[in-house]
Amino acid sequence: MDERIETTIALTVNGTGVTRRIEPRMHLIDFLREELGLTGSHVACEHGVCGACTVRVDGEIRRGCLTLAVQADGKTVDTVEGLSDSGELAVLQQAFHERNALQCGYCTPGMLLTAQALIRERPDATRDEIREYLSGNLCRCTGYQAIIDAIETVLRTPRTEGVR
Amino acid sequence: MNDRIDPRISTGLAPQAAEVEAPPRPKTTEPAKIAKSTRTQVGYVGQSVPRANARRLLQGRGTYADDLKFPRLAQVVFFRSPHAHARIRRLDLSQAARQPGVIAAFDGRAIAEYCTPWVGVLAHLKGIKSPPQHAVAIERACWQGEAVAAIVAETRAQAEDALGHVVAEWEELPVVTDMEDALANRVVIHPELGDNICFARSFETEGFDAAMKKADVVVEETYGFGRHTGVTLEGRAILADYNAAEHSLTVVHATQAPHMMQDIFSRHLNIPEANVRVICKDVGGSFGIKVHVYPDEMATAAISIMLRRPVKFIADRLESFLTDIHAREHKATVRLACMNDGRIVGFDLDDLTAIGPYSVYPRTSGIEGNQVVNLVGGPYAHKAYRAKMNVVFTNKNVTCQYRAVGHPIAVALTEGIVDLAAQKLGMDPAEFRRKNLIADDAYPYSFPSGLKFEKLSHHQCLDKLLALMDYKGLRAEQAALRKKGIHRGIGLAAMIEVTNPSPAFYGVGGARISAQDGATVRLEPTGMVTCLVSVTEQGQGTEGVFAQVCADAVGVTIDKVRVITGDTGVTPYGGGTWASRGAGIGGEAVLQAGKALRANIVELAAAVLQVDRATLEVRGNAVVERASGAEQLPLAEVGRIGYFRPDTLPMTFQAELTVTRHYTPREYGFTFTNGIQASYVEVDTDTGFVRLLRHWCVEDCGTVINPMLVDEQIRGGIVQGIGAAMLEECLYSAEGQLLNGSLADYLVPMTGDTPDIEIAHVSTPTRQSELGAKGVGEAGTAGAPGAVMNAINDALAPLNARVSVQPFTPERILKALGKI
């Protein structure tokens, strides 16, 4: 017989309230992907090294693979899908596109969320500081230079609509 | 008849969606705003056009295999051998099968009833041998991580929970982990094969000994290369969906070669090939990892047939380290003989490489070593060459072709020993290379190992590199800093690279791996162009460059082109993505198909307009008068007439607005490219840490279709090569246990480990194709380790220290310095 323990969580994901019964062991990234079908955030290293699962919880970036879904109970979670629809990432996305700062795209949602946090926290970051800030996000395709270039372009461009 | 004259006649129909500017969603990235260069009317080839398919990836709206869910989808996980070599005494799956959510549990025998074993050999690698390999091991496991049972459940968590209830009793067998032990054959892993040698090759040019004896100077060094792996960010992924009513199998697969996999699923699962469809959607990195047949993936497909429902397998990170192909475990001694004036007489190679317990199917694990033999000494004009190479079995994970197959080994061996010779002669390494690189006017050229080069540009590339990096200035800076106790080094690495392979690579050996590719180009009724290509997209931008080539070939703006790849049910037949072949081979097929469509469009327009077809041309989405450029018929009108009003055309005329063309390179075995890299490093002689300051690459890949995409391929490749040189190694204990199976323990380059990389090009288009494009995806990886090694050794030279075993960890550098 199934002896799984379940618990109910209620949270806001990309602006919409959701309530689910889940196992307490479920990670936030699996909750988003498997329960809600938000597959934009990815699973890669599964223990907090690579940053592919980066999402935002109450405004702060978090590793979805190191956060339990129950820890997000009552909180606000934003993923790349929601931040694309709201337009918050539009300028970064455009800069990434024009500079080809992505190849396979698997690390990209995590890169964008991390880069957006950098833009908000340290708008005057130097190139070395950009590298440092992104040092927890693994990209196996690009060699990083294009990513750094794209973020630097956004930082050096006068604020426009889309960057908040 | 007026019907065909004015395309703007109001028909009362709603406007075509394609003509609506953008989805009515504010603030999102609007396609029309993104790419400035999409406004250009002609001449996309050669421009840095951003690739359209990046948009969905940027919004997290791609479709990787693990993103898909089918009705009744089951998840499979594998119980894997904890031992490197052991007999399965007893395997009891009954408890596991009773766990919550578990649908079935299978051992190797059960799977084997549905999936036949395979043997990874090819006829043109003479003498290569390997035992039959099953999808799930029967009786014996030969490496730690080999699958020995499959558990299928409704969710992955349930399947993983049930793994703990598998009962296995093992009889441990003697383990062979060291290459030289394997070669000594004291323990033979597969007794039925007689010895541990999978493949051996030796080669010697005529008069080799006599030539070498005449040399003034001979230098010799032994080099080691750490076994490493591709670390695709997305793990291997497969979703197999068997339809019992049709006896058909649809596989959504993270793969580089859908048609190859279609053939293999068909033959090993006993389903007619026409009933197998392989679909490759977005893939999270491949690098050669996803072009091989993996036992657990074959088992997943077999289980879908057994259970008559869709089944998904996604490798987790530990499984990736244990079972994704490894590569490049080599130990090689190389000798270089030269004259006192610096002229190289010859190279002598003795290479040993270990591949795990099986040669991987269907490409074999003999190719990497074979490439090393083919390529050592490649850029230079010597005549004498001898090579000996042994490929041996060991009880570690299997190895096979990973990005730049054999090249990083061959380049490091060649360039390492070339630098050592220059040092011995007291010559500048750049001058030593200039003296020996094959002259730019010497082509076509036959290399001592038998390879033929169509046209290379070593000297142009060397000159360009030295200017790009300000070689003289750097040397002066290096000398000045040495006086202050700062140890910087400059390393060069010239290279040749196999691209656009002909059927000589696999087809002649009996592998059903296509060297040709095809493109279908179709004018849609709206004037849009759909382009279906057999080459796949793994993120390198193939779909983007095909759109560029197609737009130019047909005569439309690039926003009118839609490219579709990665579906055996839809695209022409072809080889896919490997060996730096996608743009060069697939691109030529697209060019020829696009030109044929353009001719057919002109023919239809000539019939409509009743003018000589020679007076017409397709330009800017319309048929125009060739001489004046005046618009005659928009393509939307050509499409409308061709598809909906052919009754208005002459009785003898049939519109053909879909055409298919194929291309195979055949004149040369490979379309070789060349290039040269340089690395500038600083070694901290107290800690052994190396800081990579800068890196340069000058590459000749012929026609550059998209400079930005090409440069990013090179940069990404260089950083993978830097990983091999500085960080990456799959470490095994003497018992064959992998010691670093996570990304916390197996290090790959992160932002802080990588320098900015400057790239320049020399362009020598291949004359084998009209497009003239050679491959470029592996060049960076091929040359970077050799350049970095030479830079470190250049920094260490005044301290009389050298390193020759990759990766160059701080420990190895401190040992070389005699500090530990």
Image (tube, helix red, strand yellow):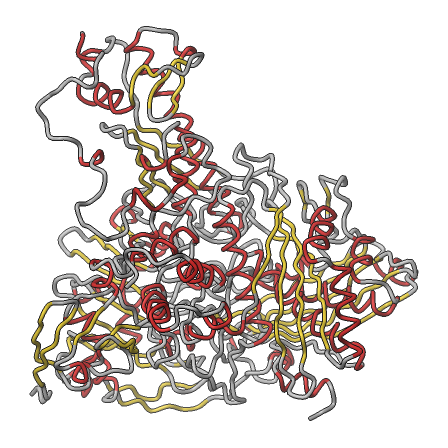
Quadrant where the image shows the C terminus of chain B: bottom right
Q: Which x, y percent locates residue B600?
A: 35, 20
Q: Residue B768's image quarter?
A: top right
Horizontally, residue B791 falls left or right of residue B498, namely: right
Residue beneath the point at 88% across and 67% down: B426
Q: Which x, y percent locates residue B14?
A: 11, 30
Horizontally, residue B567 falls left or right of residue B760, namely: left
Q: Which x, y percent locates residue B327?
A: 53, 69
Q: Which x, y percent locates residue B195?
A: 58, 75
State the residue in front, B545 or B486.
B486
Regarding residue B339, the answer to whether it shows in the image is: yes
State the residue in front, B106 or B63.
B63
Horizontally, residue B420 falls left or right of residue B87, namely: right
Q: Looking at the picture, does residue B266 appear above or below residue A35?
A: above
Regarding residue B195, the answer to whether it shows in the image is: no
Q: Residue furthest bottom?
A: B820
Residue beneath the point at 53% across and 65% down: B365
Quadrant where the image shows the N terminus of chain B: top left
Figure disc tally: 0
Residue beneath the point at 27% across and 16% down: B654
Q: Residue A39's image quarter?
A: bottom left
